[in-house]
Image (cartoon, helix red, strand yellow):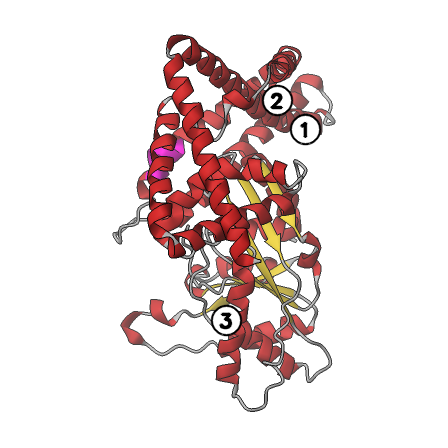
Amino acid sequence: MLYKALKPLVRLSIQGFFKDIHFIGKENLEHDGAILVSNHPSALMDPIVIAAFSKKQLSFIAGAEWFGSGIKDWIFKKHFKMIPVQRPWLVKNGEKVSNKDMFEACYTSLDEGNRIIIYPEASSLTVPWIRELKSGAARVKIGADHYMKGDKVTKIIPIGMNYTNAHRFHSDMLVNVGDPIDFGDILGDQSIDDKERSDRMTEVIRREMKARVLHIEEQEDVLVIKNVLKLLSDILMKELNIAEGDVEGAFNVKKDIISSVEYFKAQKSEEMMKVEERLNSYIKDFEGEGFRRFNPFEKSSSFVIRTLLIMFFGFPIFIVGIIMNIIPFSFSKWAFVKYLLIKVSGETKQGAVHPAFAGSLAYALAFALFLVWYILVSIVAAKLYLAWVSIPVALFVGYQTGRYAIRYVRLFRKLMKIWRWNRLKRKNPSKVEHLLSERSAIISELMGLRKDYEKERS
C-alpha cells in the first residue's frame, strides 16, 4: 500500500526536519478501536507526525473540500483511509449538508478495531492554547458504542502537540499522549439526552487536552510566560532533581511555571507587572547582544574544550554532509522564501495560504527536493561503482552526515556565542555585570513568588 511505502520515508524526513521529537505516553497511540483527539497548531504536520510514529495505520477525519474527485479521492480514501467530513460553516450559499456517511464510516472503522484521529478544534491555528472544541469526537463515540451494542467500547485518547516553533526548521517537538479518558458518570446518566451528554463529554475532552499542552489561558500572558520559562525552567529542574532528558519531568515543570505566573497575574497583578516589566527589559537587553535561549555564561571551559575536540575530529564527516546536502538544502530554502512564503498570509485573498500551513509547506517542499536529490545521487553512485549496493549506502551516508552537519553548525554557533560573550566581558564589563546581576535579581524575585504560590496551593 502507498501508506506503508511512504511511512518509513516520511518518518526519516520528519526526524531530519525537527531537531528532537519526544513522546510521553507513546504506547497509548496503539489502543484498538480508539479515537485520537489532538490540538491542531501545524496543519498537515500534526497528522503526519502521529501517523509516522504509530505502529498501525490510522484513519483521518478530514474536510471534504480536500478530497476533490477521481484519483485523488480514491487515493485519500483507499490508501490513506481518510474519511471526509462536511463542515457547514465552509459550505457556500448556506446549503444544508449531512455527515451521516461520515458517522457510519467511523462506526464501521472503530468496530473493526481501527484508530481514527480527529481534530476537534475543526481548523488549524498556531496558538499555545486549546481552543473551543466541536462535539464530533464525543458524538462518534456515543454512536459507535450504540452501533457495537456493548460488545466493544470506544476509547478516546487525548494528545497534545507541543512545538517550540511549529514552522521553524530544526525546532523541537513534544507529543504528549494521555491514557483513555474516563468520562465518569456522564455515559451512564439516563437523565440527559445524547446532545447534553456529548456537550459534557466535550468539556472533559478539552480539559484532558489542556493537561497535555503548555496551555496559556490568556493571550496577553503569552510573552511574559515565555520569558519566565526561559529563565526558570532549567533552574527548577535542578532544584527538583529532575534529570536532563526527563521529558515528562521537564513538561510538568513548565506546566507548573505557567500555572504560577497565571495565578500571580490574577491575584497580585501590580507586583507581577513590576516583575514583568523588569523581565522584558532584561530579555530585550540580553537578546540585543545577540543571545537568545542559549546562556554562554553557564558553559565551563571543559564544555568548550570538549566541543572543540568534537568539531576537530568530526570535521571530515561535516564536510561530507555539506557536499551531500548543500544543494537540496539551499534550493529548498530559496524556493520556499521565493515562491511559498509570500503565500503564507493571514489575509483572506485569492492565492493566500493560512499561516498554520507554513511549517507543512516547508517540510513538503524539502521532502520532495531531498527525495529527488538522493535518488539522483544513488543513480550516480551506482553508475560509478557498478554495484546497486551503493544506492542504500549513498542514501544512508547522505542522510546521516546531513543530520550531523546540522548539529555541527549548531555547536559552532554555540562556540561563537561563548566567544562573543567573553569579548563583551573584555570590552564592556559593566554591561556584563549589569546583565548577570539583573538576571540574578529577577530569578530571586520569581522564586520568591513561586514559594508564595506553593504556600497558597498547600
Considering depth in this image, is 272 or 414 the residue closer to the camera? 272
Q: Earlier in the sequence, mark 1 or mark 2?
A: 2
Q: Quadrant of residue 421?
A: top left
Considering depth in this image, is 42 or 296 the residue closer to the camera? 296
Q: Main secondary structure of the magenta part?
A: helix
Q: Residue at x 48, y 15 (%)?
A: 416
Considering depth in this image, is 417 or 138 the residue closer to the camera? 417
What type is the residue that disc 1 sits on?
Phe
Q: Residue reaching furthest bottom?
A: 191
Whether residue 278 appears in this view of the structure is yes
Quarter containing the C terminus? bottom right
**Residue 397 position within the rendered picture, expressed as x and y whole percent measured from the top left:** 66, 24
Q: Which region shows up in magenta?
A: 335-341
Whether residue 353 appears in this view of the structure is no
Q: How far apart, in angstroms, are the residues tagged by discs 2 and 3?
A: 57 Å
Mark 3 highlights which residue? 203
